[in-house]
Amino acid sequence: MVKSSRRSGGARLDAARLLVRLVSLLLLPVVVSFSHSGRASSSASVRWTRPTSQTASVAARATKMPTSRLAPLGMAVEGDFDPEAISRSVEEVKDGSIRARFRALYKFTRPHTIRGTILASIAGTIRALVDTPGAIANANWGANLPRAFIGMAALLMGNAFIVGINQIFDEGIDKLNKPFLPVASGEMSKRFAWAAVLGCGTIGPILVYNFFPTVLFQLYMLGWGLGAIYSVPPIRTKRNAVAAGLTIATVRGFLLNFGVYFAVKDAIGAPFGWSPKVSFIARFMTMFASVIAVTKDLPDIEGDKAYNISTFATRLGVPKIAAGATFLLLLNYVHAILTGLLSTAGTYRMLPMVGGHAVLGAVLAYRYSQLEPESIKSIKRYYKHIWDLFYSEYVLYTLI
């Protein structure tokens, strides 16, 4: 019994170390890019005395500020919006720069959503391995690692397909709300965007069909279909606030977390079972994704109104939506804490389950206290913090 406990504890420690290393590698480019963008913004604010008419007018509409007073905006999740830098990038693409095209393709994939998908995959894999006695020591890594990378590639292609097709059909709205996105800014042509979307939307399903069980292919295609009709007319579920929220919650909250765990269990030959931890993360992340589905519209009110997109944010306004979203997330953290306290002894590790969620709840309350509903920069910062908490939950998931 003691040896089993030690092996279990050692497996958790190894898994935690692995996750920390992977997360560090994953987030290091983000930190570097933000530090560079910060220096670029400072430089731009000194040099930027006469913006180009097109980029300045787009940015002015997006921020409700006169062009003469315009300054670079700190974007919430995707770096700084520097119209001068975007103009240079557009020119580089026109001149045939491969580097500029790859940079546009990277932005096209919406990196903050990619990070969420990668973290969900890593955390779900570690959780499944730790939950299966002997899996880490006895796994056939020579066969399973290539399969894991294929699965990750399929998930990233599905992610790129969904966010990419959204940018194609939302080009006009994005010119108001997100002028830094490559289709809206002109860094990526519609033809290239369609090629990327169709490529990802075709190769992803082929990979899942050929390397994974039928049930996973069916779940993948369910997410693929829901992601497509979110943006594509005539259904275009994003036009309805409830349907849009349910779509995002289903794909990012349930299908992703369940699918990864199921795939790992299948790969190591272990039967799938709804363990308390898997059930918890499915509930918790479905609620969290529902809140993200609502708060993502907070910075986009002007463009959504212009294109008759009905969202909770356009109906109720920033203050009420931010307050409601914060309240729901705090309830989610309370639910996590009570789940840990009221469960049978030994089901969860109390420090991460109770203490970790209490800390994240306190961080959320603090970030909300800093929100200035009239400031677009503050709204975007608040939305970024929600994504940061979303990422952090996957770290706790491997430790609970």
Image (spheres, rainbow, N blue to C red):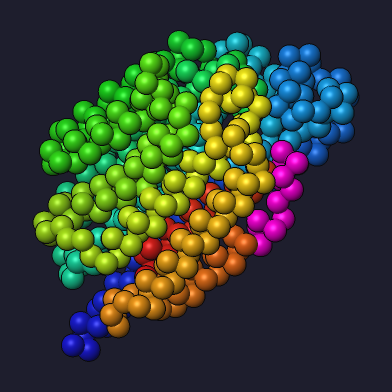
Residue 23 or residue 388, whichever sits in front: 388
**Residue at coordinates 33% horizontally, 62% vertically from top-left?**
280
Residue 142 seen in this snapshot: no
x and y percentages locating residue 400 in the rendered image = 37, 70
In the image, is 361 to the left or to the right of 45? left
The mark total stands at 0
In the image, is 280 to the left or to the right of 208? right
x and y percentages locating residue 343 in the rendered image = 31, 77
Residue 159 or residue 106, whichever sits in front: 159
**Residue at coordinates 27% horizontally, 23% vertically from top-left?**
202
**Residue at coordinates 44% horizontally, 72% vertically from top-left?**
337
Residue farthest to the bottom, as pictured? 2
Residue 376 seen in this snapshot: yes
- Write down the region rendered in magenta: 366-378
Image quadrant assignment for residue 250 = top left
Residue 157 or residue 172, whichever sits in front: 172
x and y percentages locating residue 218 in the rendered image = 19, 36
In the image, is 278 to the left or to the right of 378? left
**Residue at coordinates 57% horizontally, 55% vertically from top-left?**
326
x and y percentages locating residue 7 in the rendered image = 24, 78
Is residue 316 rendered magenta in the image? Answer: no
Residue 74 drawn above or below residue 281? above
Residue 210 drawn above or below residue 99? below
Residue farthest to the front, as pictured? 315
